[in-house]
Amino acid sequence: MDVLYFAWVRERIGLPKERVDTSAATVMDLVRELSAREDRYALAFSDLSALRVAVDQELSDFDAPLGGVREVAFFPPMTGG
């Protein structure tokens, strides 16, 4: 699946997007897998309350299932102006 990173998440990880082969069942499982890769991922995912996630371009929860999913995006909460 494609994993996209936006704003400060992209800055911490150093990539805007990557292709990930995973057996993760949920978004949280994916976060755990990514966090275990390197310190930069662990830092980016260290405070999940500061992150939002979209699964196939729909806002989701971290317990969302990943079966058949093509894209997961991580980003900070949006504020209006």
Image (cartoon, rainbow, N blue to C red):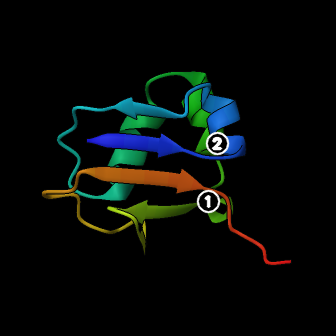
Q: Describe the element under mark 2 as helix, strand or loop.
A: helix
Above or below, 53 against 8 in this view is below
Residue occupying the point 70% across, 33% down:
11
Farthest-out residue, right = 81
Above or below, 4 against 57 in this view is above
Query: Cβ–Cβ below 8 Å for labels 1 and 2?
Result: yes
Along the viewing direction, whichever of 4 and 62 lies nearer the viewer: 4
Q: Amino acid at mark 1?
A: Leu
Q: With 42 as the anchor, is 12 left or right in this view?
A: right
The image quadrant where one finds the N terminus is top left
Along the viewing direction, whichever of 30 and 36 lies nearer the viewer: 30
**Residue 4, percent across and down?**
47, 43
**Residue 78, percent across and down?**
70, 69
Farthest-out residue, bottom = 80
Badge number at residue 9: 2
Above or below, 44 against 77 in this view is above
Q: Badge 1: few (under 14), some or many (20 or more) residues near its Cα, within 10 Å?
A: some
Number of numbered discs? 2
**Residue 62, percent across and down?**
42, 65
Badge number at residue 23: none
Along the viewing direction, whichever of 21 and 4 lies nearer the viewer: 4
Badge number at residue 51: 1
Residue occupying the point 60% across, 58% down:
48
Give the mark nearest the N terminus, 1 or 2. Answer: 2
> Alpha-carbon distance for marks 1 and 2?
9 Å
